[in-house]
Amino acid sequence: MRITINVLAFASDFVPDRLRASAIGWYSATAGLFQLIASLIAGMLWDIVGHTSIFLYGAASAFRDHRVGAVASPEPTRGDLRRVPKFATRVTAPVAS
């Protein structure tokens, strides 16, 4: 549940304050729709091919998504001034005592 809360906070940080509730609603509806589609695909694979096909399909999808993300993500440049979300925290090095 904590991951969902963090994702909602991150997603709502990119919309104006007056549209925050709508953005969270659209995000939740979209996520629910894709979870339904994924469950239907998994059920059909289980019935038609067998239980191992679900894990192979999941591994292939994860690999594909990783490759798409690696290609589609822009390389950060030195001095990249992209907006940092409000809830991001700085990591500080421990002080030697």
Image (tube, rainbow, N blue to C red):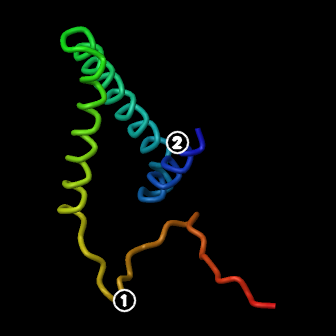
Residue 15 is left or right of residue 72, and the answer is right
Q: Where is residue 2? Give x, y as percent.
A: 60, 44
Badge 1 marks a residue whose secondary structure is loop
Relative height, residue 84 to residue 64 (above, below): below
Q: Where is residue 39? Give x, y as percent.
A: 33, 21
Give amino acid for label 2.
Answer: Thr
Q: Neighbour class for label 2 at 10 Å: few (<14), some, many (≥20)?
A: few
Extreme top residue here?
47
What whole-number distance in Å separates the C-alpha atoms at marks 1 and 2? 30 Å
Q: Which residue occupies 34% across, 34% down?
A: 30
Relative height, residue 10 to residue 48 (above, below): below
Camera-nearest residue between 69 and 97: 97
Residue 37 is left or right of residue 86, and the answer is left
Find residue 33 and report its image quarter: top left
Residue that mark 2 sits on: 4
Badge 2 marks a residue whose secondary structure is helix
Residue that mark 1 sits on: 79
Q: Neighbour class for label 1 at 10 Å: few (<14), some, many (≥20)?
A: few
Q: Which residue occupies 43% across, 35% down?
A: 28
Q: Which residue occupies 38% across, 82% down?
A: 81
Give amino acid for label 1.
Answer: Gly
